[in-house]
Image (cartoon, grey):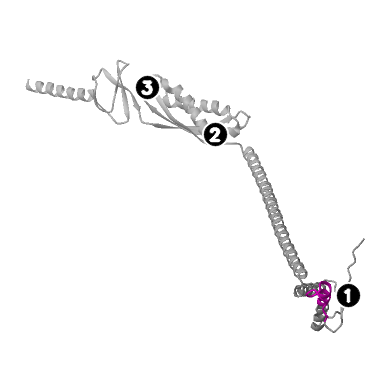
Amino acid sequence: MDFGLDYVVIGIVALLILVLFAGVKTVPQGYNYTIERFGRYTRTLMPGLRIIVPFIDRIGAKMNVMETVLDVPTQDVITKDNATVSVDGVAFYQVLDAARAAYEVRGLENAILNLTMTNIRTVMGSMDLDALLSHRDEINDRLLKVVDAAAASWGIKVTRIEIKDIVPPRDLVDSMGRQMKAEREKRAQILEAEGARQSEILRAEGEKQAQILQAEGRREAAFRDAEARERAAEAEAKATEMVSQAIAGGNTQAINYFVAQRYTDALKALATAPNQKVFMLPVEASALIGSLGGITEIAKSVFGSDGGSHTPAGGRRPPSVRTHEGA
C-alpha cells in the first residue's frame, strides 16, 4: 500500500514538471513567437520568459524581427533603348508584425526576393542605358518605394534596396570606351581652341593698350615740344624786341652781341649739317672782331652818335647815307 502511494506521488511530481516545461517558454532577444490554440492564432510572445497554457497552446512560428539581408541574384534586364545588361543587388528588410509575416504570406523571403527582382526589371527597363549607368541612386529610391509599398501588407518594412553591379555586354563596353575617348579628345580640342582664342584676345588687347599709350605719349611729347617752341619763340621775340630797343637807343653793344650770336649759330648749323662740304670762311678771331667792328661802324653811321658824325675805326669815314622819302 505504501509503495503504491509512492508511485502516485512520483507520477504527480513528474506530471507537474512536464506541465511546467510545457507551459513556460523562453523567447530569445530578436525573435517573436506566435501562439496557436487548437490551430488558431491567439497572441504573440515577446522576448523573455513567457507562460502558455500547456497542451492547449503551442508555438506556431518563430519570427526573426531583426533586420535581415537578402541577396538578389544576377538577372538580365533589357533597357528602354534595347541594351541588355546584367544586374544584381541586395535588399534589407525587417519584420514589424510577426503574426502578419507568418500568416499573410507563404515563404516570406522567397516572396520578397521575387517582388524585388520583378520591380528591378520594371524600373530599369523604363530607363535608357546612359541614365541607368549614371542614376543609380534614383533607381534605388524608386525600387525601395515600390517594393516597400507592395510588402507593407505582409507586416514587414523594406529598409533599403541597393543595386550592386550593372554589367553591360562586352561589345557595348568597348563602344562606350571609344565614345568616351572621342568625347574627351573633343573637349581637349575645344579647350585648346578656347585657350588660343583667349590668348589672341589678350595679345590684341595688350597691343591695343600699348598703341594707345604710345599715342598718348606722342601727343604729350608733341604738346611739350609745341610748348617749348612757343616759349623759345617768345624768348626770341623778347630778345629781338630788346635788341631793337637797344639799337633804337643807340646802344651798339647790343647789336654787336646779336650779330655775333647769329654768326656763330650759322657756323654751328653749317658744321653739323649731314651734307656739309669743305668750306673756307674767315673764322679767325681777329677777322670776326673786325667784321663786328665794321658792323658797329655801319650802325653808328646810320643812327649817329650824340647828334653828330662819328669817324669809324681805320680812319675812314663811311659814305653818308641819305634818306629819300618816297613819292
The kind of residue tagged 3 is Ala
Q: Which of marks 3 and 2 is nearer the N terminus?
A: 3
Q: In this view, does 310 lie above or below 245?
A: below
Residue at numbered disc 2? 135
| Mark 2 crowd level (few <14, some 14–19, many ≥20, 10 Å Cα) | few
Q: Nearer the viewer, residue 123 or 299?
A: 299
Residue at numbered disc 3? 102
Q: Which of 131 and 104 is in front in this view?
A: 131
For the residues labelled 2 and 1, the Cα–Cα distance comes to 121 Å
Residue at numbered disc 1? 320
Span of residues in magenta: 295-312
The kind of residue tagged 2 is His
Give the number of callouts. 3
Residue furthest toward the front?
307
- Residue 36 horizontal/vertical position (percent): 30, 18
Taking the magenta stretch, the answer to whether it contains residue 301 is: yes
User: Cβ–Cβ below 8 Å for labels 1 and 3?
Assistant: no
| Element marked by disc 1 | loop
| Mark 3 crowd level (few <14, some 14–19, many ≥20, 10 Å Cα) | many
